[in-house]
Amino acid sequence: MGTKPQRKIIQIKARITEAQHADLQKQAQHAGMNISELIRQRIMNKPVISSADEGAAKSIDKVGRMLKHYYPKDKGWASAEDRRKWWRLVEELRQIARNIQSGSKS
C-alpha cells in the first residue's frame, strides 16, 4: 500500500508586484500548473518544465525510437563507422529528450 501524501499545513505569504504576479501566472500557465505548485517546485529546487518543452521532449524521444526501430539489420548497408554514427545519433536524441524531461541542461 502506498503512503498517504502529506497534508499542506503551513502557509507562506509574500508581497510581490502586479508585474511579478503576472509573470508567475504566465510561467505557471506554460508549465501547466497553478502558481502555488510552481512556487513549491521552485522552492524545493525541482525542475519546472514548460508544456512546450515536454511536448518537444516527447517528439525527440519518438524520433529516436523510430530511428532505433528502423535501424537496418543488414550489415552491408553501410560501413562500421556509419553504423556507429547512426547508433550514436539515436542515443543522443534519446538523451536530449531525457535531459529536457528532467529539467537539466544538455
Image (spheres, rainbow, N blue to C red):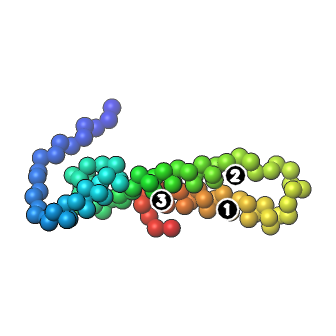
User: Looking at the rendered structure, which numbered label has been put on residue 13?
Assistant: none
- Amino acid at circle 3: Ile
Residue 7 drawn at (x, y percent): 17, 42
Rate crowding at label 2 as few (under 14), some (14 to 19) or many (20 or more) other CA atoms within 10 Å. some
- Amino acid at circle 2: Leu
Q: Is residue 25 visible?
A: yes
Mark earlier in primary sequence (2, 1): 2
Quarter the N terminus occupies? top left
Q: Is residue 26 left or right of residue 66?
A: left
Q: Nearer the viewer, residue 24 or 44?
A: 24
Q: Are discs 2 and 1 less than 8 Å apart at CB? A: yes
User: Looking at the rendered structure, which numbered label has been put on residue 100?
Assistant: 3
Measure the alpha-carbon separation of dots 2 and 3. Answer: 19 Å
User: Looking at the rendered structure, which numbered label has been put on residue 89?
Assistant: 1
Q: Is residue 103 left or right of residue 64?
A: left
Please give the count of numbered marks on the rendered protein.
3
Q: Is residue 92 left or right of residue 42?
A: right
Residue 59 drawn at (x, y percent): 56, 51
